[in-house]
Image: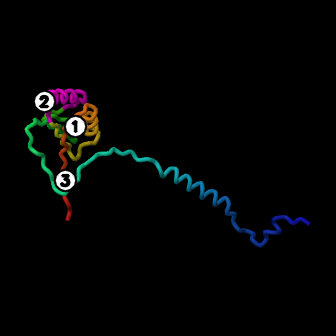
Amino acid sequence: MINSRSEQDSGVFGAPELTPLIDIVFIVIVFLLLTANSPLLKLPIDIPESSEETTLAASDAPVITVAIAAEKPYWRIEEQPFTDWVIFKESLLEQMATADQTITIAADKAAPTEPLLQLLAFLHQNNITNTQIIMEQPSSSL
């Protein structure tokens, strides 16, 4: 005679089914693997490494100082503030057209990064490479 399944499994009555549990665990693992590999956006910047502080070398070429302030107006050329980005770009190009000049960029530590990135993108678009960025070396806390 054919016995039903419930009569055969009477010894393991009440044991949990592991198949649905394993399915759920695999689904959660796949979900975590797919969501954990989201790419991070990066902006590669080559910063020279130095063990000593370096100072700006005095050169004979005229220097244009561009400052980025912490508050509006963000952009300044030789202490002259500019509230409009378009006017700032035109003024910078006019000053660069006179001679081969070096641009020194000094950004306030509390300044937002957007004005600095706009300036760096503008310099890159116009192939202006004769630039220096003034940076303060972090003090070591001993």
Where the C terminus falls, by quadrant? bottom left
Q: Quadrant of residue 94?
A: top left
Q: Secondary structure at mark 1?
A: loop
Residues in magenta, as a range: 82-101
Separation (CA) of disc 2 from disc 3: 31 Å
The kind of residue on which mark 1 rests is Thr
The residue at the point 39 percent across, 45 percent down is 41
Relative to residue 121, is residue 92 drawn left or right? left
Q: Residue at x 26, y 38 (%)?
A: 120
From this view, report whether residue 113 is shown above or below residue 4. Answer: above
Q: Is residue 37 above or below residue 20?
A: above
Q: Give how far across and how far down residue 74 sits, in percent.
A: 22, 37
**Is the N terminus in the top left, top right, bottom left or bottom right quadrant?**
bottom right
Residue highlighted by disc 1: 129
* Residue 55 among magenta residues: no
Image disc number at residue 137: 3
